[in-house]
Amino acid sequence: MENTARVKSEEMVGRIDGRLMKNKVVKGIFLTATIFTSIILVVLLYRIISQGAPYLSWDFFQNFASRRPEQAGIKAAVIGTLWMMSVVIPTAAILGVGTAIYLEEYAKKSALTRWIQMNISNLAGVPSVVFGLLGLTIFVRVFGFGNSVLAAGFTMALLVLPVVIVAAQEAIRAVPNELKEASYGLGATKWQTIYRVVLPYAIPGIATGSILAFSRAIGETAPLIVVGIPTFVAFLPSGYLDSFTALPMQIYNWTSRPQLEFHNLAAAGIIILLGVLILMNSVAVWIRNRYQAR
């Protein structure tokens, strides 16, 4: 009996040692992957900042694009991006949140709704150039918007719309049923429950997912190229049907030039773009923390 117990004990210790060894190996693999990606990120940031930081000046923000690198600026691209996002944000937010509310609160659970939700999830992973082709067909050719702010804004809204819908659906599903039942018990209608109970509780998730989606819209280049947004613009748009350019297009234009000075200008534009993305992500984190505290 003692020999049998000793053998079992040794087998147990051997199994534990084997599991600990596997745990150390897996931990080492994950640590190596983390260190490798961190090194790549640091090198990339150092390259961009070292090239672009000397070109960041007030004149860089005030000047329009130019064929001379010492006179080139990013004013038209920054203002054009703001014009485009003024179309993307309300369009994607209203359509996305409205669709999520309908699918989660009003639509009956059936094969059709499951099919719609499956396709929405699949659209979130479709390459951005496909949305550019869709925007070119619908907004540029059918509606005749041309390479205007409206055409680009609606195209980018279609690009981020599936992400906004999925994020809003997940946030609405996270609302406890007890809160809804309590609202119904007090005599509230379905819309009153959604407006006063569901949406306030779901705002952190909706806002976080939406802002991250809008960040993607700011940095995408392929849909704008397909729609036909120009890379060289020396004026500001005065309306939503005017031609314009955006930050990704301006950066793309500078990187395609053979002169080294334009590559440095592109690095400066990337710094600005990264700053905008970091600011938007910070706002998303702030909104989430504020409403979760409440």
Image (spheres, rainbow, N blue to C red):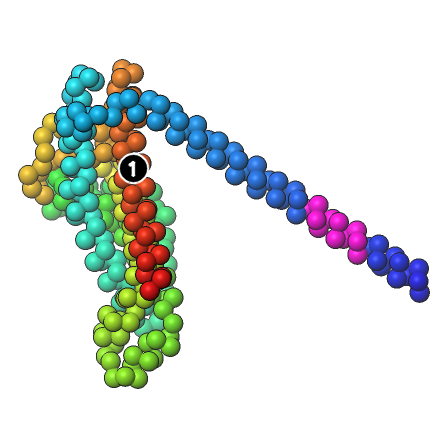
When asked about the image quadrant of residue 52, the answer is top left
Element type at marker 1? helix
The percent coordinates of residue 266 (x first, y second) are 27, 25
Residue extent of the magenta highlight:
12-22
The percent coordinates of residue 128 (x first, y second) are 30, 42
Give whichever of 250, 74 is nearer the camera: 74
Q: Is residue 182 left or right of residue 41?
A: left
Residue 156 to residue 105: above or below:
above
Q: Which residue is drawn at the image coordinates 52% and 33% (left, top)?
A: 36
Q: Which residue is drawn at the image coordinates 29% and 16% (left, top)?
A: 260
Give whichever of 132, 285 is nearer the camera: 285
Residue 145 to residue 56: above or below:
below
When asked about the image quadrant of residue 103, the answer is bottom left
Q: Which residue is drawn at the image coordinates 32% and 58% (left, top)?
A: 290
When asked about the image quadrant of residue 227, the answer is top left
Q: Quadrant of the C terminus?
A: bottom left
Q: Which residue is drawn at the image coordinates 90% and 61% (left, top)?
A: 4
The percent coordinates of residue 238 (x first, y second) are 6, 39
Residue 268 to residue 195: above or below:
above
Q: Quadrant of the N terminus?
A: bottom right
Q: Which residue bears the numbered disc 1?
A: 275
Q: Is residue 58 visible?
A: yes
| Residue 102 covered by magenta stretch | no
The percent coordinates of residue 24 (x first, y second) are 66, 44
Q: Is residue 236 left or right of residue 8?
A: left
Q: Residues within 10 Å of mark 1 (few under 14, many from 20)?
A: few
Q: Is residue 258 visible?
A: no
Q: Count the marks.
A: 1
Task: Name the amino acid, label 1.
Answer: Gly
